[in-house]
Amino acid sequence: MVHGSLFLCATAVASATVDFDVMVYGSSPAGISAAVVAARQGMKVGLFEPLKMIGGMGAAGNLALNDGGTHAEKTGLALDFVQRAAAHYGLPAGSRVTHPEAHVSEAVFYEMLRDAGAAGGHAIAVKLDCHVLSAAATGGDNANNASSSSPSRVASVTLSCAPGAPVTATAFIDASYDGDIMTAVGDVAYTWGRESTATYNESLAGARAPGWAGVSGPQHVDALRADGSLLKYVQNISELPPPGAADDALMAFQHRLCVTNNASNRVDWPRPAGYDAADFELLQRAALAQGNHSGFSLGNPCPGLPSHIAKFTTCCGIAVDASD
């Protein structure tokens, strides 16, 4: 569908005493898709979400902006999603809304889960605010040993929402963004960061050489404080890994925030506790260098949203003052 990591963990031995046929952790669009398909096939499904809402990046805090663009949702569950979203806005049958508002996205996901459970004969159990505390396994060496000849099978997962009652299932699917079940089990092989160019002979792997190709915005913003030290979030180029080298860093991420210029349909942004404007001095300087214009994408309504809704997305951009 839209966003979501999907990891299929090792399955436990089938048993008549398990809580679910399929236990899905993480209600990212990938997790919701897995739950919907399993339920449609008559399986008993439990969907457990660490946040207090479902939908992951398909619904949380934004306009369900996905990286597929407005023409990606052509078939299957993705098409079902955008057509259901259009129905929520009262548009004619067959219409598509690819980037609905967050509350509409969440409502559509719940609708898909409900209908899938009804079609398969087992309502999907949805539990929110559930974090993985531990995972019990059977077999294997529980040492994160990718070369293990006998990897473990997930036997149960203990969650914060029911710490005294581990969840058992025939199959466990980790569709979270962090792979919590994988790490809790211990010997499921995984990786993070960037491999070097030499690992798989990939010319574009590893760290990249800094440069301005494809980058918009000002290119001569002073990144030094008055005492000569670097502003927060700025690295000295001499401290960066050489091009092509491996690293263990996380990728940049974006705050895709839903905003509006409609005074009757908005809430104020309170100053966060611990806010320090000095943390964002680089962004301030970049905006001033452009005549008080920021690199955030604010000028157009989110693509695919019905035009009568005056909402926008602060998102994206490859610039000194972008939202990465």
Image (spheres, rainbow, N blue to C red):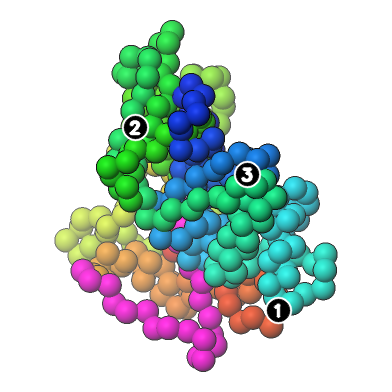
Question: Real-space Cα distance between discs 2 and 3?
Answer: 24 Å
Residue 187, x across and y down, in percent? 37, 21
278 left or right of 310?
A: left
Give the CA distance from mark 1 to mark 3.
35 Å
- Crowding at label 2, few (<14), some or many (≥20) Cα neighbours within 10 Å? many
Residue 244 showing in the rendered view: no
- For badge 3, the amino acid type reads Ala
Quadrant of the rendered image containing residue 143:
top left
Please tell me which residue is depicted at 51% across the width and 76% down the height of the picture. Answer: 259
Q: Which residue is mark 3?
A: 39
Q: Which residue is mark 1?
A: 307
Residue placed under numbered mark 2 in the picture: 135
Which of marks 3 and 2 precedes in the sequence?
3
Q: Nearer the viewer, residue 122 or 237?
A: 122
Q: Seen in the image, is 200 located left or right of residue 98?
A: left
Question: What residue range appears in magenta?
Answer: 253-274
71 sits left or right of 263 in the view: right
State left or right for residue 185 relative to residue 274. right
Rendering coords of residue 15 (x, y %): 49, 26
Residue shown at 51% from the left, 71% from the top: 258
In the depicted structure, whether residue 168 falls above or below residue 95: above
Kind of residue at disc 1: Ser
Circles 1 and 3: CB distance less than 8 Å?
no
Question: 10 Å neighbourhood of mark 3: few (<14), some, or many (≥20)?
Answer: many
Residue type at numbered disc 2: Ala
Label 1 and label 2: CA atoms lie apart by: 47 Å
Whether label 1 touches label 2, CB < 8 Å: no
Going by the picture, which residue comes out furthest to the left? Answer: 227
- Residue 23 in the image: state x and y as whole percent: 49, 39
